[in-house]
């Protein structure tokens, strides 16, 4: 397959128009700690993330948990009941008055949890008939509740609290905690102990580990373990044959990106078809830089890691090497193995169940968030195969293009996170351009085999596209209210911009813009931007107090939302425009006004579409109303250039 490399000096072209606000799902945010006051590298980041994903502990609701703070006895009772996944039972008991003498002191939100904990023997009160809900929970009290919840109290022999603390230590509940028995625990210690308890196998009625059960995490929550990630998209993941959506954000441990989970075994929690927590349990795909072949069927990566691999020959199970898109599964010889893999090559090692390398992928490169500018199907009746053209920007005015990159049966194609055909991609690109104009491009991440050692984008022949991930729906549209060095603020939120693709200064303050974002949620394509000559449309309902000398009148107009507004002393004039040049801006069913005489302007425009502008160049400041008349399509040929209007509320679409 041949292609040409073009180095272009281009300008970013805007497709003018107007759209409503729309936010579409793109890539999810991958985090470790979901709380702002728990660092990603904190020892308790996993514990807090797990508890939040399971709905056991969600902090204060503002993204914080105050890890050094304490919990009350009522709060910890809720934690323990939620750890058993019995929140629904607690809700059912919330209307009952707890059987404690200080029931009035128990907050309304806690009553159901206190009742559920009391009914299952998790709490018994102070011994004087009270519960003391507002007192800080101590280590001794916390481990007692957890040991009881897991069913191990019948096997305890000895005085409280020493015997309960000893049992908790035996079960691993207090691993990582060094608090004294009578000292209130911190929220951080609560997270550690609760996460530890989730990994314990519940006991049978005699207080002995039930051999027929898995851990509480699996028993109570259906937590899945050691399942292989088989596929992924910006916001979805396939594990053990089933597709799941990903929560946003999603807590991931053992990998920095969703792509890094591909091929690895994971433990994960999903509810309602949405994965909220993922942790690599067994790394079966290793990415790294190849260093050298070693003796005794071993290889070494540049970071010093050494792996055993299947033999090159003489066995039924041979090392498979995939190079430049071709897979050699009959082994490679000792003499020519360096022809396939060289020092410094980026490789992916696939491990078998014994952590032995069974497959090596080499000779690929990944280009993230480039532009998809063209799709050509080989056969309109065959949706699978064809070619694509890609464009990568090195600055807003310079780009490089790959033309005619082949999509075949070795290419994995995804569209907005879903598996797709090339025809699906072609249709989506066409729909994008139907809505936003022929200059609108999609965004793609591609993985290409065949020119690993080439420094420039597309600087080789014979490459093969093995992965094409296309984005057409990660769209944000709103008014640009502020600009930074690499972001704009829209609808109160920062939208980051890839400044190689877009100059932030090209997005005008105070104007609506529609941007297409990549899977890193950075804007690279401007789909629409408010035109340089802002025009605002309304329906003229009536007029009064006409001053023919000044060419002014008081007018009443209907706005886009159906409301009616009175405007005083508005200048009136004629705007020469071909009706088709405004297209979708007109209200359906309204006939365009064609004025034969200037003097009859207001009468002719009643109940019709008008254009209202502000600060017209060459005129005094003030609002102007214009009729729409057939004639030249240029705004500047008759009335001059229109400056930015602050009256955005009178647009009618």
Image (cartoon, grey):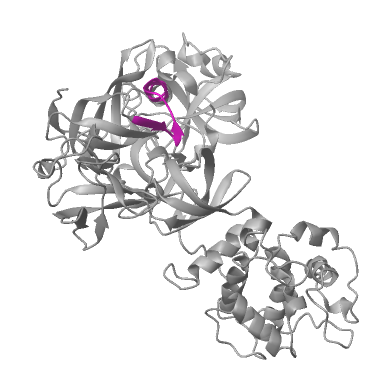
In the image, residue 59 lies in the stretch drawn in magenta: no
Can you give x and y, in whole percent of width and height, for residue 630 in the image?
41, 11
x 56%, y 62%: residue: 50
Can you give x and y, in whole percent of width and height, for residue 270 in the image?
58, 49
> In this figure, what is the number of numbered marks?
0
In the image, is 550 to the left or to the right of 354? right
637 or 402, which is in the foreground?
Answer: 402
Is 57 drawn above or below residue 625 in the view shown?
A: below
| Residues in magenta, as a range | 412-430
Can you give x and y, in whole percent of width and height, for residue 351 in the image?
34, 50
342 or 333, which is in the foreground?
Answer: 333
Is 48 drawn above or below residue 390 in the view shown?
A: below
x 39%, y 38%: residue: 516
In the image, residue 422 lies in the stretch drawn in magenta: yes
Q: Residue furthest front?
A: 314
Q: Quadrant of the N terminus?
A: top left
586 or 421, which is in the foreground?
Answer: 421
């Amino acid at each position: 397959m041949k292609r040409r490399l073009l180095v272009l000096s281009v300008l970013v072209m805007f497709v003018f128009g107007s759209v409503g606000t729309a936010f579409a799902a793109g890539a999810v945010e991958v985090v470790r700690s979901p709380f702002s006051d728990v660092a990603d590298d904190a020892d308790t980041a996993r514990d807090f993330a797990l508890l939040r994903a399971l709905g056991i502990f969600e902090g204060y609701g503002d993204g914080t948990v105050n890890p050094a703070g304490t919990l009350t006895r009522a709060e910890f009772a809720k934690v323990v009941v939620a750890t058993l996944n019995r929140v629904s039972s607690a809700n059912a008991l919330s209307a009952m008055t707890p059987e404690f003498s200080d029931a009035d002191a128990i907050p309304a939100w806690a009553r159901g949890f206190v009742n559920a904990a009391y009914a299952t023997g998790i709490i018994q009160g102070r011994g004087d008939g009270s519960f003391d809900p507002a007192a800080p929970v101590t280590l001794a009290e916390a481990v007692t509740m957890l040991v009881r919840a897991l069913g191990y109290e019948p096997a305890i022999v000895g005085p409280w609290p020493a015997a309960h603390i000893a049992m908790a230590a035996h079960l691993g509940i207090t691993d990582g905690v060094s608090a004294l028995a009578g000292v209130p625990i911190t929220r951080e210690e609560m997270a550690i102990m609760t996460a530890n308890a989730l990994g314990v196998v519940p006991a049978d009625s005699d207080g002995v580990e039930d051999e027929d059960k898995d851990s509480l995490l699996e028993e109570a929550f259906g937590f899945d373990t050691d399942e292989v990630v088989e596929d992924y998209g910006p916001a979805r993941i396939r594990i053990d044959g089933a597709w799941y959506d990903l929560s946003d954000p999603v807590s991931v441990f053992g990998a920095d990106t969703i792509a890094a989970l591909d091929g690895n075994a994971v433990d994960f929690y999903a509810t309602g078809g949405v994965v909220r927590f993922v942790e690599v349990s067994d790394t079966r795909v290793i990415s790294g830089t190849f260093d050298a072949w070693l003796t005794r069927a071993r290889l070494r990566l540049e970071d010093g890691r050494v792996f055993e691999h299947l033999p090159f020959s003489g066995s039924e199970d041979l090392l498979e090497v995939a190079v430049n898109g071709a897979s050699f599964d009959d082994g490679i010889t000792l003499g020519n193995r360096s022809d396939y893999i060289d020092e410094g090559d980026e490789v992916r090692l696939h491990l078998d169940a014994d952590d032995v390398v069974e497959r090596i992928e080499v000779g690929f490169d990944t280009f993230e968030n480039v532009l998809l500018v063209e799709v050509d199907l080989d056969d309109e009746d065959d949706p699978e195969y064809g070619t694509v053209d890609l464009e990568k920007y090195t600055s807003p005015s310079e780009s490089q293009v790959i033309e005619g990159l082949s999509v075949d049966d070795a290419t994995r194609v995804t569209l907005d996170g879903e598996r797709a055909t090339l025809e699906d991609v072609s249709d989506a690109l066409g729909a994008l351009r139907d809505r936003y104009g022929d200059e609108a491009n999609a965004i793609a991440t591609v993985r290409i085999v065949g020119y690993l050692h080439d420094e420039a984008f597309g600087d080789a022949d014979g490459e093969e596209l093995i992965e094409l991930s296309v984005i057409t729906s990660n769209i944000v549209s709103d008014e640009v209210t502020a600009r930074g060095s690499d972001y704009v603020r829209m609808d109160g939120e920062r939208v980051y911009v890839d400044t190689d693709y877009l100059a932030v200064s090209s997005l005008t303050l105070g104007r609506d813009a529609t941007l297409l974002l990549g899977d890193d949620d950075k804007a690279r394509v401007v789909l629409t931007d408010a035109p340089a000559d802002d025009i605002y449309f309304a329906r003229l309902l009536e007029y009064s107090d006409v001053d023919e000398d000044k060419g002014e009148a008081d007018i009443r107009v209907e706005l886009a939302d159906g409301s009616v507004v009175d405007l005083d002393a508005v200048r009136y004039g004629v705007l020469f425009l071909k009706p088709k040049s405004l297209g979708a801006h007109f209200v359906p069913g309204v006939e365009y006004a064609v004025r034969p005489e200037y003097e009859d302007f207001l009468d002719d425009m009643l109940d019709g579409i008008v254009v209202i502008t502000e600060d017209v160049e060459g005129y005094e400041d003030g609002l102007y109303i214009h009729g729409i008349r057939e004639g030249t399509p240029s705004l500047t040929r008759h009335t001059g250039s229109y400056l930015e209007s602050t009256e955005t509320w009178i647009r009618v679409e």
